[in-house]
Image (cartoon, rainbow, N blue to C red):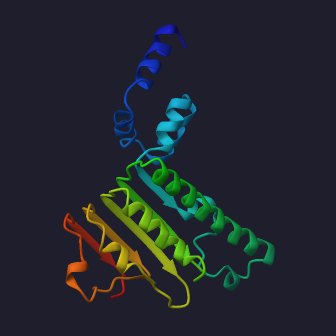
């Protein structure tokens, strides 16, 4: 790499975060992650990118299974899958906590998860509370549960005043609150519901 190319990279790195975030928004998630190897500056830009993509399938090939036991997988493999699920949830915990502590904006949050345990379900509620405080504009939730269970997000979702786009798919309960004044979705422009319970 010659001096001219190095100089160009340095000049780009000096741009404000919001411009670099805008550049990343045109890239695929994989490409955006790869920018983190350019320099420490770009690593920070990626880590504070306001579009959060959280797909459970990226943490293990069998994580799309609701009940691995039914697939006759060995006990060690089932334990590995459960640990991968926990690692995925811990990743989201850390990511959202950082955004909360540093008061970083979350423009868009995509979550694809299979909730296999009632014990783990409250963590999803906590994530929704954290992103709601970050003035989120777009929320895409794909939540699946086993054994006919559903996850009720009504109380949190109805309070997201900054939300403009909401996509819900899967084992999600969406009940109307008893008091219509509790609904604060005043900015909502698009609502997409699929296989949602009410």
Residue at image location 33% in from the left, 69% down from the top? 167
Decide: is 20 above or below 134.
above
Image vertical order of residue 157 relative to residue 88, above or below: below
Q: Position of residue 19 (x, y in %)?
A: 34, 34
Examine the image and state in which quarter residue 182 appears: bottom left
Residue 31 seen in the current view: no
Left or right relative to 133: residue 6: right
* Residue in front for this viewpoint, 157 or 141: 157
- Residue at horizontal 21 percent and vertical 66 percent from the top: 188
Name the spot of residue 74 as percent of width and height, x first: 79, 77
Q: How many marks?
A: 0
Residue 9 in view (yes/no): yes
Please state, as top left, top right, bottom left or bottom right, where the C terminus lies in the image: bottom left
> Considering only vertical position in the picture, is 73 above or below 93?
below
Q: Quadrant of the N terminus?
A: top right
Residue 95, compared with residue 165, is above or below; it is: above
* Residue visible at 68% across and 81% down in the picture: 71
x and y, in percent, of residue 67 in the image: 63, 82
Viewer-proximal residue, 166 or 76? 166
x, y percentage for residue 72? 73, 82
């Amino acid at each position: 790499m010659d001096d001219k190319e190095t100089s160009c990279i340095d000049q780009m790195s000096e741009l404000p975060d919001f411009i670099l975030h805008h550049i990343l928004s045109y890239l695929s998630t994989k490409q955006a992650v790869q920018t983190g190897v350019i320099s420490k500056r770009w690593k920070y830009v990626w880590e504070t990118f306001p579009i959060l993509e959280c797909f459970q399938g990226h943490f293990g090939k069998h994580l799309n299974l609701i009940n691995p036991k039914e697939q006759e997988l060995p006990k060690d493999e089932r334990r590995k899958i459960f640990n991968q699920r926990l690692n995925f949830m811990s990743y989201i915990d850390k990511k959202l906590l950082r955004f909360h502590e540093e008061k970083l904006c979350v423009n868009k949050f995509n979550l694809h998860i299979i909730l296999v345990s009632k014990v783990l379900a409250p963590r999803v509620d906590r994530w929704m509370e954290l992103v709601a405080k970050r003035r989120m504009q777009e929320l895409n939730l794909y939540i699946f549960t086993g054994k006919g269970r559903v996850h009720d997000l009504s109380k949190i979702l109805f309070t997201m005043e900054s939300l403009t786009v909401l996509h819900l798919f899967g084992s999600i309960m969406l009940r109307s609150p008893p008091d219509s004044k509790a609904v604060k979705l005043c900015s909502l422009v698009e609502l997409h519901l699929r296989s949602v319970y009410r």
